[in-house]
Image (cartoon, grey):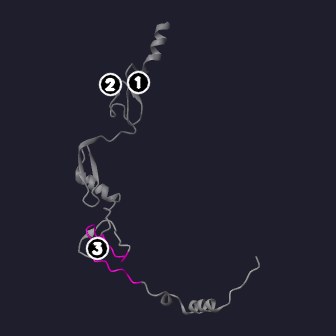
Amino acid sequence: MQVDRDLDKVGVHCAIKDCNLLDFLPFICQGCQGQFCLEHKEEKEHKCPTPIVKIGGTTVTCDKCESILPVPVNCFEKDILSMHLRKGCPKKTTVNQHKCSFCPKMESIKIVCPNCKNNFCIKHRFERDHKCKPRVNPPLQQTISPHLQNLLSQLRNSKPVKTNS
């Protein structure tokens, strides 16, 4: 009959071989992606090889890394925490703190005065607020090695070379 063959194209048969029920609204298992009838939709009913862990409505927070961990149904918080610690809990990342050169305040960002090259908090970041004393650069003669000083003096005393252009 033509009608029976057309109905086979509309629905999906249950993936359980013994059932093979034609279902027009099959359930798709989130674990194994199989299509099942109402009777076999549960993971335990079709013996799902890759069941999905159902998450309960609770969570637990790790004290070390402050991660929020979901607690599956029928599990204890302490078991979830110990498993998290065994797998290698990432320790909490600390924010670098930079001490102000003018007051004891700490800032998470580094604010360096371009004039005196010291670090300051937001309140003392401007030169007028931290009584800025610019760093005095040593004279050029002190920063140059004696060998270079000798070469410079020779260049200053030498006669300019004329080029034919």
> For the residues marked 1 and 3, what is the alpha-carbon distance in whole angstroms?
80 Å
| Amino acid residing under circle 3 | Arg
The residues colored magenta run 115-136
In the image: residue 136, left or right of residue 140: left
| Residue at 30% over, 55% down | 83
Q: Crowding at label 1, few (<14), some or many (≥20) Cα neighbours within 10 Å? A: many
Q: Main secondary structure of the magenta part?
A: loop
Q: Does residue 73 sit above or below 34 in this rendering?
A: below
Marks 3 and 2 in Cβ contact (< 8 Å): no
Q: Nearest the camera: 150 or 66?
A: 150
Q: Does residue 41 sit above or below 55 in this rendering?
A: above
Residue 73 visible (yes or no): no
Residue 131 lies within the magenta run: yes
Of the image marks 2 and 1, the number of the one nearer the N terminus? 1
Q: Which residue is mark 3?
A: 128
Q: Nearest the camera: 140 or 68?
A: 140
Of the image marks 1 and 3, the number of the one nearer the N terminus? 1
Q: What quarter of the picture does the C terminus occupy?
A: bottom right
Q: Which mark is residue 39?
A: 2
- Residue 76 image point, x, y percent: 23, 49
Q: Which residue is mark 1?
A: 14
| Residue at 34% over, 34% down | 43
- Residue 20 image point, x, y percent: 42, 22
| Amino acid residing under circle 1 | Cys
In the image: residue 148, left or right of residue 163: left
> For the residues marked 2 and 1, what is the alpha-carbon distance in whole angstroms?
9 Å
> Which one is closest to the eye, mark 3 or mark 2?
3
| Residue at 47% over, 8% down | 3
Residue 14 visible (yes or no): yes
Marks 2 and 1 in Cβ contact (< 8 Å): yes
| Amino acid residing under circle 2 | Glu
